[in-house]
């Protein structure tokens, strides 16, 4: 049984994580940590880790960058692995996460969906075969409330593809500003915002008389919570180091 502490348990994603833990047969939520400190769950919720009496096997963090210092301090003091799902960290905070991974196991990914990370692996394989002769374009779609564009996941995909290509590509985000032919070393990245689209990503490999596409659609945010719980079960068995979804997928 993997005992989990959920940071940000009273938030929307924290609630989804609690639901995902509840239906996972070999997991249980030991306690939650949330700045508001009130509990709407069937497990205790504390305002900070200082109030926690029991030690979890792993921490899942879907909260706010402001919670990082307290979480890492507790995790390092008690040798507890961390699955970090929060985004928006500063360069200094990312460095703190990397330093913590020298002493404890840390799972850090910009997208916790198993499916999207499988898409990244498939896109990398396609790029190895097609990348020198096919044009590569990435299209991402999200709801109309999403502020940033392109999505962090689209950039994850582009970076993964870039690592497999012989020549480092140029990312092109806004083609209407260019009055010239598409260069062979480009990766086009395009954003769509509308309605309640949870998240869709498509990678297009366009060649002479044929097109190969790899697509992923997230139908709900629960897929990210389920991925975080799977990561927690995986991480609880690992030694110190930095892990991501590629390490989890390698076990399937």
Image: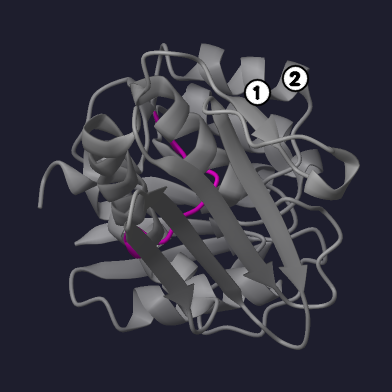
- Residue 61 visible to the viewer: no
Mark 2 nearby-residue class (10 Å; few <14, some 14–19, many ≥20): few
Estimate how packed mark 1 is, as few (under 14), some (14 to 19) or many (20 or more) residues with alpha carbons within 10 Å: some
Instruction: Report x, y in % for residue 11.
Output: 71, 71
Q: Is residue 185 left or right of residue 51?
A: left
Q: Going by the image, does 208 lie left or right of 187? A: left
Residue placed most toward the observer, 214 or 224: 214
Circle 1 is placed at which residue position? 94
Q: Is residue 211 magenta?
A: no
Q: Residue at x 75, y 43 (%)?
A: 173
Residue 144 image label: none
Magenta span contains residue 111: yes
Whether residue 40 is visible: yes
Q: Work out which quarter of the rendered image holds the N terminus and state it.
A: bottom left
- When the figure is inspected, residue 128 is found, relative to residue 233, above or below; the finding is above
Name the foreground residue: 32 vs 194.
194
Tag 2 and tag 1, C-beta contact below 8 Å: yes
Q: Is residue 85 above or below residue 35?
A: above
Q: Could you tell me which residue is drawn at 34 percent across and 49 percent down?
A: 208
The residue range painted magenta reads: 106-115
In the displayed structure, would residue 245 be above or below residue 217?
above
Tag 2 residue = 91
Instruction: Name the element at disc 1.
Output: helix
Q: How is the image coloured?
A: one colour
- The location of residue 136, given as percent across then percent down, is 48, 43
Outermost residue to the left: 252
What residue is drawn where x is 42% and y is 11%? Answer: 102
Quote the CA–CA distance across marks 2 and 1.
Answer: 5 Å
């Amino acid at each position: 049984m993997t005992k989990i502490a959920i940071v940000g348990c009273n938030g929307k994603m924290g609630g989804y994580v609690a639901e995902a833990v509840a239906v996972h047969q070999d997991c249980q939520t030991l306690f939650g940590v949330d700045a508001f400190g009130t509990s709407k769950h069937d497990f205790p919720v504390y305002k900070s880790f200082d109030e926690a009496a029991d030690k979890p096997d792993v921490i899942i963090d879907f909260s706010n960058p402001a919670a990082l210092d307290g979480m890492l301090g507790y995790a390092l003091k008690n040798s507890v692995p961390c699955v970090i799902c929060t985004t928006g960290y500063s360069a200094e905070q990312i460095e703190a996460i990397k330093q913590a991974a020298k002493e404890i196991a840390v799972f850090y990914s910009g997208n916790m969906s198993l499916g999207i990370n499988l898409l990244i692996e498939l896109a990398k394989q396609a790029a190895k075969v097609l990348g020198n002769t096919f044009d590569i374009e990435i299209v991402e779609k999200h709801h109309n409330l999403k502020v940033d564009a392109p999505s962090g996941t689209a950039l994850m995909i582009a970076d993964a593809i870039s690592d497999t290509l012989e020549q480092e590509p140029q990312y092109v985000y806004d083609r209407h500003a260019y009055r010239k032919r598409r260069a062979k070393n480009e990766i086009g990245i395009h954003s769509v915002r509308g309605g309640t689209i949870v998240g869709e990503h498509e990678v297009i490999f366009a060649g002479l008389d044929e097109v190969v596409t790899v697509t992923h659609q997230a139908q709900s945010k629960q897929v990210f919570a389920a991925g975080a719980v799977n990561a927690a079960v995986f991480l609880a068995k690992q030694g110190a180091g930095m892990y991501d979804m590629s390490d989890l997928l390698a076990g399937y």
